Image (cartoon, rainbow, N blue to C red):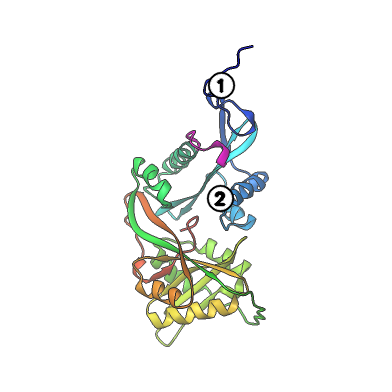
Amino acid sequence: MLQSHPHNRPRKLAGGIPAERFIMRMRQMTRQDIADGMRLKDLAQWNQTEADWERFLFASPEGCFVAEIDCRVVGTAATIIYEDHFAWIGMVLVDPGFRNRGIGSALLQRAIEHLESRSIACMKLDATPQGKSIYEKLDFVSEYEIERWTLKRPPARVNWEGLSPELHEVLQVDREVFGADRSALLRSLSESAPDFVQVLRPHTGVTGYTFGRRGSLADELGPWIAYEERAAAELLDSFLARSSRELVFVDCLKSNSWAIGLVRARGFEFGRPLTRMYRGDNIFPGRPDIVCGIVGPEFG
């Protein structure tokens, strides 16, 4: 009996689906899809939690999408609109067994179409080196560079007893810093990790502030905002004292010499580069000059 050569057999995707015959269905994401989203982000070794998916679905229930093949979720993309100033695209994930089939590009295009239907003039995202060329083909251009820094240390017991600071003034300042109102996101972060919220208010007003998250892999500092190096150092040290985790992440602006120098001096090691990119008219750039660390690539 003749046997077919291995190179002549139909290639198959994960689950035994022939690569040439798969049919992808795209639809809006729902809360029932969070478990699949967590599975995909775990495969990518990202730091998000179920609460982060909830934040996307709460903020933009019509702007989060999944791709399905044979009733199996194999990809995701999510958006958040920050006022009418710009929107964020994040959580573009594809199951490793289904990559290189255009699924990620299709999800990204669906997110762009959704935002265009809402008349959003500017879209932003943080790109990995692998994704940057894909985004450039869709007219995204670079704004500035970001670096992930990671601290590994022995876990510690922390007994934090304190009150969360009043956020009204901070949220007003942050609107100028970020370029748009993201108060709903920051309030959510404050409610889930009140001990990570810090505000420095000397006599002249707010000079710096931080929020943070307890991710699935590490505690994550961000946003980390400071008008001067002394304030940046005080905020970082206080955050590290309030965190008990063995791993700590922070995504620093590469151009911010305070941030890079401070984390390096405290034992953080470089993890990975990212590029902040935008599509459209970036007329609300915010104040990146005083941003030490962002919330995260998924939220901006």
Vertical position of residue 161 compared to residue 194: above or below: below
Callout 1: few (<14), some (14-19), or many (20+) C-alpha neighbours within 10 Å? few
Q: Is residue 102 magenta?
A: yes
* Residue at screen point 42% across, 62% down: 147
Q: Is residue 213 magenta?
A: no
The secondary structure type at the circle numbered 2 is loop
Vertical position of residue 70 compared to residue 272: above or below: above
130 left or right, relative to 63:
left
Pointers 2 and 1 in contact (CB under 8 A)?
no
The secondary structure type at the circle numbered 1 is loop
Q: At which x and y percent is residue 104?
A: 49, 40
Residue at mark 2:
44
Residue at mark 1:
9
Tell me which amino acid carries mark 2. Ala
* Residue at screen point 56% across, 55% down: 46
Vertical position of residue 29 compared to residue 256: above or below: above
Quadrant (top left/top right/bottom left/bottom right) for the N terminus: top right
The residue segment tinted magenta is 95-103
Residue 205 seen in the figure? no
